[in-house]
Image: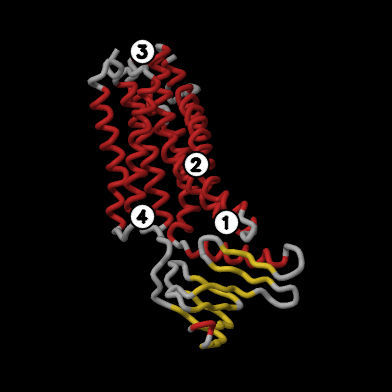
Amino acid sequence: MGRRAGVGGGNVVALHAARATAWTSLAILGVAVLAGAVRVLPWIVAPHVPLRAALPFARALFTVGLETTLLAAPPIGWAFCAAVLVERGEARALFATGTSPAGIVRTTLVAAAGFALLSAIVSLAWGREAAAPGRLARALVAESKLSCSDGAAGERAAYVPFVGLTWLCFPDAPPRLAGQLPTGGGSFSARDISISDDLRSLELSDLRLMVGEKGAISVRAEKAEVRGLAPWGRGSNLTPPVRALLLALTGAVMALLAAGIVLARSIAHRLLSLLIGGAGPIASLLVLSRLEQGDHAPWTYLSVPAAGLLCLAAVTAVTSLSRFGAPA
């Protein structure tokens, strides 16, 4: 049994940990998809919002959910697998052969690295959108514009979700983008719009501006650029590679530590193992979400793994006082 769990054997422990993580991922991702569907559903059923315009936003929500899943699932799966080993007596048998908890955990390094790589790939993909929210805004504008050529003939409108503008579709003329001025008291229309990555500037072509009561004042410009806007969305403070490295390493390290703690304390209670595995990722996600709401230096994101490790230590200390967490 010790040979099979070792590096030179079949590494059954790593297989069980990967399987438990896969099932955990499906459960977490299912909840994330359901939560995302609730947010997107009002746009999908709205008659003035084209279905294709909601797809980029739905894709972004799915990627965020997948990123969250790949951070939280490995620690939970690894801890749960360790508790099963203790419950079935396999961990005790391995200890009898001279294999330490750290030795058992080491046999899962390759599997943990695999999930870390997958997490890094997803975080890298989403990090491009997170660092430049204007990409999503441009995709929504483009998809809504394309819907003008999809539907039935005749005048109609296609609302651009999140951006708050509307494409006016005409049967015999190019569509025009229309909206209200941020300060009120006027409206505008344009042939097209380009939004910067940080959402702080816009470039409009063939702009027609109407202000005053009933559009008494009209201004027209072939091209107009607006700068210094207050962004209506926040970009991540981290570059995509740094974000990917941070989340991948955080998830992998907490997975290995959670499994080691469960094995070292011979915790056979499965629900308690879920608590040990899930506490760290939840704390890390909360800190990450908080940091992304403001302007912070990249080094402050070291508090993301630090919060997870502190929470894991706190939960371990609390469980050591319970009858479930006492070593067998």
CA distance for labels 3 and 1: 51 Å
CA distance for labels 2 and 4: 19 Å
- List the single residue furthest toward the right: 153
Q: Badges 3 and 4: C-beta atoms under 8 Å apart? A: no
Q: In the image, residue 312 lies at what x, y percent? A: 29, 33
Q: Earlier in the sequence, mark 4 or mark 1?
A: 1
Which of 289/218 is in front?
218
CA distance for labels 2 and 3: 37 Å
Q: Earlier in the sequence, mark 2 or mark 3?
A: 2
Three-letter amino acid code at the position of disc 1? Pro
Q: Which residue is mark 1?
A: 56
- What residue do we see at 55% from left, 60% from top? 161
Q: Earlier in the sequence, mark 1 or mark 2?
A: 2
Q: Badges 1 and 2: C-beta atoms under 8 Å apart? A: no
Q: Which residue is mark 3?
A: 92
Crowding around mark 1 (Cα neighbors within 10 Å: few <14, some 14 to 19, many 20+) is: some
CA distance for labels 4 and 1: 21 Å
Crowding around mark 2 (Cα neighbors within 10 Å: few <14, some 14 to 19, many 20+) is: many
**136 shown above or below 214:** above
- What residue do we see at 58% from left, 54% from top? 43
